[in-house]
């Protein structure tokens, strides 16, 4: 695969307007490192302003509704997010699967709604600690991915995020990351044939400046989805630099 590494920050429910200065600093650094594709998914409230003030990075959303419009109080559709300035959307994050009981079928529908308006999609999958401990992680995550995938690979990336590694400072063994990414690649090529070989598979879960280089060097790791460390330029830029 000759694609650039894709380094994406997920700001979750963090960031008031003052945080745009961090995004601008990240943007300036990203423009000096053109070999890396960089993006941030801020809260929806910051999408338009970040899009205007940071021109060298992608700006995305953390979720979308699968319908185009309708009686869904408080929800936002993919076309609305696109119009607000988002060029990709994260779907199926484990926090949404847990907090909002999102199913694989809903995740698939969200991904297809985003693709319908030509947005990129980052589809998240990952196992719980109990599933990892019982030796079922690869099986569980492969099934989750197969059931969540949209019908086409258009602008699709996948993020493997072990739930127990998110925000905990713990990361899997490099050999476990390699085995999982290999397995997920097989799911992607089963579904999309040769196009499945070009879908980037990001690793996510406690990525920091200190461990980024080692994780990015793993076969089939095409980038990183970064939570906590992406909130500041000091945290995020070293990760981007590790990918350059
Ligand atoms: C995430 O939630 O997508 C994530 C990877 O978080 P963190 O980097 O903080 O573990």
Image (cartoon, rainbow, N blue to C red):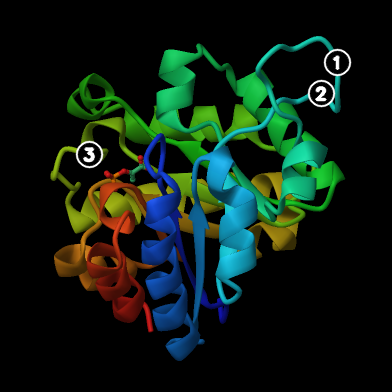
- On the image, the x and y values in percent for residue 72 come to 74, 12
Q: Are marks 3 and 1 in contact (CB under 8 Å)?
A: no
Residue at the disc numbered 3: 167
* Residue 67 disc label: 2
Q: Residue furthest front?
A: 18
Looking at the image, tell me whether mark 3 or mark 2 is earlier in sequence order.
2
Task: Report the mark closest to the observer, 3 or 1.
Answer: 1
Q: Residue at x 82, y 40 (%)?
A: 79
50 vs 111, left or right, is left
Residue nearer the viewer, 37 or 106: 37
Q: How many marks?
A: 3
Q: Are marks 1 and 2 in contact (CB under 8 Å)?
A: yes
How far is the residue under mark 3 from the one under mark 2?
A: 31 Å
Q: Is residue 6 above or below residue 47?
A: below
- Ligand 1: which quarter? top left
71 vs 147, left or right, is right
Q: Quadrant of residue 139?
A: top left
Q: Are marks 3 and 2 in contact (CB under 8 Å)?
A: no
Residue at the disc numbered 1: 70
- On the image, the x and y values in percent for residue 115 come to 79, 46
The crowding category of the residue bearing disc 3, from other C-alpha atoms within 10 Å (few below 14, some 14 to 19, many at least 20), is some
Residue 103: tell me if it is visible.
yes
Helix, strand or loop at label 2? It is loop
Helix, strand or loop at label 1? It is loop
């Amino acid at each position: 695969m000759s694609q650039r590494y894709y380094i994406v920050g997920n700001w979750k429910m963090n960031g008031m307007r003052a945080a745009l200065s961090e995004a601008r600093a990240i943007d300036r650094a990203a423009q000096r490192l053109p070999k890396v594709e960089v993006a941030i998914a801020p809260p929806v409230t910051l999408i338009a302003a970040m899009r205007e003030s940071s021109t060298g990075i992608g700006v995305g959303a953390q979720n979308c509704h699968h319908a185009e419009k309708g009686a869904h109080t408080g929800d936002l559709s993919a076309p609305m997010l696109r119009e607000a300035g988002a060029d990709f959307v994260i779907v199926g994050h484990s926090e949404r699967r847990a907090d909002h009981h999102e199913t694989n079928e809903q995740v698939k529908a969200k991904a297809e709604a985003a693709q319908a308006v030509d947005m990129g999609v980052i589809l998240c999958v990952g196992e719980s600690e109990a599933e990892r401990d019982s030796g079922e992680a690869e099986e569980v995550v492969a099934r989750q991915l197969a059931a969540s995938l949209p019908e086409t690979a258009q602008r699709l990336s996948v993020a493997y995020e072990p739930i127990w590694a998110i925000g905990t400072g713990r990361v899997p063994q490099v050999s476990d990351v390699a085995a999982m990414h290999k397995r997920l690649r097989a799911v992607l090529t089963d579904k999309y044939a040769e196009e499945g070989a070009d879908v980037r598979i990001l690793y996510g879960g406690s990525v920091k400046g200190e461990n980024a280089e080692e994780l990015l060097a793993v076969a089939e790791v095409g980038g990183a989805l970064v939570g906590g460390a992406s909130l500041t330029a000091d945290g995020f830029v070293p990760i981007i630099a590790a990918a350059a």
